[in-house]
Each structure stands twice: as C-alpha cells, then as structure tokens.
Image (cartoon, helix red, strand yellow):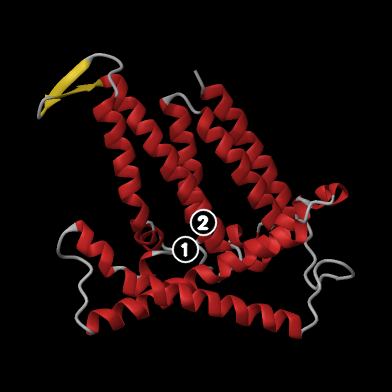
Amino acid sequence: MNQSLIIGQYVPGDSIIHRIDPRLKIIIIFLFVIAVFMANSFWSYMLLYFFVFISVGLSQIPSSYILKGLKPVWWIIAFTFLFHVIFNSEGEVLFDIFGFNIYDGALIQGINIASRIFLLILLATLLTLSTTPLSVTDAVESLLKPLKKLRFPVHELALMMSISLRFIPTLMQEMDKISKAQAARGLDFTQGKFKDRFKALLPLLIPLLISAFKRAEELALAMEARGYRGDEGRTKFRQLKYQKLDLVVIIIFTFILLIFFMLRT
C-alpha cells in the first residue's frame, strides 16, 4: 500500500530540478496554478503539458515511478471527467450511450477539468519528490517572512507543513503493516457489502489513529527535551541563496508565460 503513494516522499538526486531554489519552485507552482485555470485553448494546454513533462524529464526521476505513485488519484480524474461528460448538456449531441446524450461541449469541458487536476497533482508531486521536507519548510518560512510583522505564526505553520510531509510515508507504512497483520488474521477488506467493508476498516483505522497520536506525543516530548521554544532566538543552519541556475530558470519560465498568454484565445 505504501508503494502506491509517493506524496511526501523525496528521491535524492543532483538534477536541474533538484538544484533549483525551493522558494523559486514554490513561486513557479503558484504561477503555474494560475496559468492552469486561465488556459482556454488547445495550444495553451499543450504548452502546460510540455512544461510539466520537460520538468519531469529534467528531474531524472523515472516517469514510470511517478505515474505508478499517482494511481490513487486516477479514479478522481476519471470520475471528474465522466461527471462532466454525463451531466453537462452544452453544445451539440455527438452520440448516445445507454440513453445518455454525449455533447461536444461537455466532452471538451470534461477533458479540460481532468487535465487541470492531472497537471496540478503531477507538478505538486514533482515538488515533493525533488525537494526535501526541510527545504520546503525553509522556503515557506522565507516566503511568508513579511507576515511576521502582522504577528502571523510563520515558523509554526512551516513546522507543521514539514512534519506533515515527513510523516505521510511513515503513516502509509504503518497502515500497510496493520492491514497485512489484520489480513493474516482473516480480515477481508475487499468482499461483502459496502456496510460490511466499512466495518472491516475499523480494526485498521483504530490502531492507525492510536499509533499516530503516540508518534505525535513522542515527537512533542523529544522537541521539548531538546529545548525547542519556537522561532524566537533561533538561527538557521541552512541558508537559502539564489544561484545562476535560478536566474536562468526565471528567464525561461517568464518566456513560457509570455507564450502562454499569446496562445490564449
């Protein structure tokens, strides 16, 4: 089970994507999200797909590994596409399937929405695969630093993000162990009515929740024993600095955005 989810996992490497400043990665993803929702033509979507696939290639992370890790979200993309195709009646009727009229406008909208979800999830996954959780934490804290003047708990927010990303693979491994132990005792999660399968999940969820609370308590005690008192008076061992590569990436991404706005209808 833990092998089918790669969100929160980090793949060590020395590729171009790995060496980009994490602050710049987050800014690019933020702008990319805006571009995804502004795309309204075939070629604008093709440019976004080109950017994402080139980024995956430059990361030197096997695409098969990434696509395999996205299996849990494929059904969400498929459901979103089918929902728009079946219940949308925009445009002209293309054909009829089991009494449902399929319209060309609904088909186009379904493809657009499914493409947006796929592009966003794929690029966000690439961020966690090519950036350590500590680097993401430092980047978020650095980007939100101006909010400290408004007494916004920037350090605490970044710390929570780091802990969440760090413990996603750990919890998935724990769930895998518990599910295998319950299956060895004869518990079946896949057969029977929905009500019976839901009840069968309780022996899985209860130990998982207990384990999560126990880990949280142990982490809190460990931080307290090491004298952790928040951001006040703390210095940083890791200093983020922009490099020449980051300047090149900014220029290329700006050029891509200009082309994107030219391709919009």
Q: Position of residue 5 (x, y in %)?
A: 40, 64
| Residue nearest the viewer, comparing 11 with 165 | 165
Helix, strand or loop for disc 1? loop
- Is residue 261 left or right of 241 when viewed as pictured? left
Q: Residue furthest left?
A: 98
Q: Position of residue 136 (x, y in %)?
A: 66, 61
In this view, the mark in front (2 or 1)? 2
Q: Position of residue 200 (x, y in %)?
A: 26, 69
- Is residue 265 left or right of 75 when viewed as pictured? right
Quarter occupied by residue 21 = bottom right
Q: Position of residue 35 (x, y in %)?
A: 56, 33
Q: Amino acid at mark 1?
A: Ile
> Circle 2 sits on which residue?
126
Task: Kindly identify the residue that appears in the image at 51 percent across and 35 percent down.
Answer: 36
Between the C-alphas of marks 2 and 1, the distance is 9 Å
Determine whether label 2 and label 1 are within 8 Å by CB: yes
> Circle 1 sits on which residue?
61
Q: Amino acid at mark 2?
A: Leu
Task: Kindly identify the residue that appears in the image at 36 percent across and 65 percent down.
Answer: 4
